[in-house]
Image: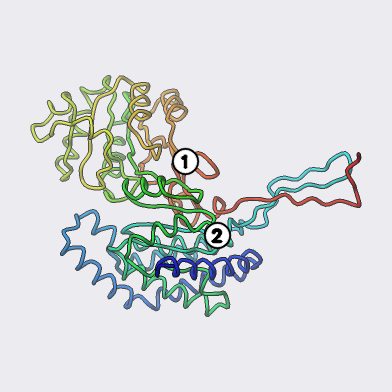
Amino acid sequence: MTAIAAMMTELGTRARAAARLLARTPAPAKDGALRAAARALRAAAAEIKAANAEDMADGEAKGLGKAMLDRLMLNDARIEAMAKGLEDIASLPDPVGRVLAAWERPNGLKISRVSVPLGVIGIIYESRPNVTADAAGLCLKSGNAAILRGGSESFRSASAIMAALRRGLESAGLPADAVQMVATRDRAAVGAMLTATDYIDVIVPRGGRSLIERVIAESRIPLFQHLEGICHTYVDKEADLEMAKSVVRNAKLRRTGICGATETLLIDRACAATHLAPLVTMLLDEGCEVRGDDAVQAVDRRVRPATEEDWRTEYLDAIISARLVDGVEGAVDHINTYGSHHTEAIVTADPDAARTFLDGCDSAICLWNASTQFADGGEFGMGAEIGISTGKLHARGPVGVEQLCTFKYVVQGSGQVRPG
């Protein structure tokens, strides 16, 4: 057995034992542990920032882009946000043990469908170290053990966060092995996780296309599929221009490196005369590169020509592709052709156009008159999220505590036997 295989067996064995305990842990104990973990994060802020400074220095030396460095960076505000996120998760209703449905059969059998944890969840993610706390907290609240494998760029930061979380759990009387990290940068560890069928029940990948494609190709474990966020904002002919400018600015530029950032702007050809130039000029003036079709290029010489590949690109940077479309049907057709089924928004005062858009887009999240950057479990009132699932089975959209549960049937009888 290789060293990595042996490590995965050890992690898996410990996680499986912790999961059995967590499945029976009452809500007050889980919530107390989450709050203790939040306190431990705050107490370890200096240690976490020191580890992050080393990661940031390495990232800069390796030439990581501005958006990637922003995803990697931790400061007091982001550490506090992680701690607050754990407390928010603790305040949510317990997702375990909920009676999802109940009925009685003519023979007197009482049948209930009851929510239960999935078991052991493996999370593979890249540069954002705050995922460590979010994922661990969501798994704990839903009664699951977690094995996390972060990206090499954030290895020190994620390790420091994990150490604080484990101290918090132990101080509250729960096993530290409820949350564990794969303590190596070796990419072979990803392959070991994807084949650990004896220990891991579900894999959640969070990262770029190359990671997701590898996970889809190699995993022998069910996935919560999190594809890239090729998100769109469509400005309809009935859109208020000032609202459209505000929504587009936020959707693209608030944080360019998150999966909910708009990557393509679609504008109704019917309002090009009034809306196209103000929107494009605003983006350019705020430092956003615009790559457009012929009509968009005609607005400003700073616009670069868009290629076919641009419509399929998640930039994660201050770059946006833009084109005119023939009304809401044209927007829906473009989105369903080029999108990644993540998040789409329409800006319009016309409820009929909005309904056509919301019904027609085959995506996990669709918004009307709001920024795509609301694609976030915390903004949905879910405390936090482990990712945005772009698949259609079991969970879709933000994956929070309820989505990290499955169910079983509980049947109560009074001595019934099945005849003949």
In the displayed structure, would residue 137 be above or below residue 298?
below
Determine which quarter of the picture holds residue 183.
bottom left
Scheme of colours in the image: rainbow
Element marked by disc 1: loop
Q: Residues within 10 Å of mark 2 (few under 14, many from 20)?
A: few
In the displayed structure, would residue 287 be above or below residue 341?
below
Determine which quarter of the picture holds residue 389.
top left
On the rendered image, what quadrant is the C terminus found in? top right
Amino acid marked by disc 2: Asp
In the displayed structure, would residue 222 be above or below residue 189?
above
Q: Name the residue under label 1.
A: 391
Q: How many marks?
A: 2
Amino acid marked by disc 1: Gly
How far from the left and from the top, in percent, is residue 86? 47, 65
Determine which quarter of the picture holds residue 352.
top left
Element marked by disc 2: loop
How far from the left and from the top, in percent, is residue 50? 27, 75
Label ID, residue 190: none
Which residue appears at 23% of the width and 66% of the height?
A: 56
Q: Which of marks 2 and 1 is nearer the N terminus?
A: 2
Which one is in front, 176 or 384? Answer: 176
Q: How crowded is mark 1: few (under 14 residues within 10 Å), some or many (20 or more)?
A: some
Which one is in front, 146 or 328? Answer: 146
How far from the left and from the top, in percent, is residue 217? 40, 45
How far from the left and from the top, in percent, is residue 130? 37, 62
Which residue appears at 47% of the width and 78% of the height?
A: 167
Which residue appears at 79% of the width and 43% of the height?
A: 103
Q: Mark 2 points at which residue?
A: 198
Which one is in front, 197 or 304? Answer: 197
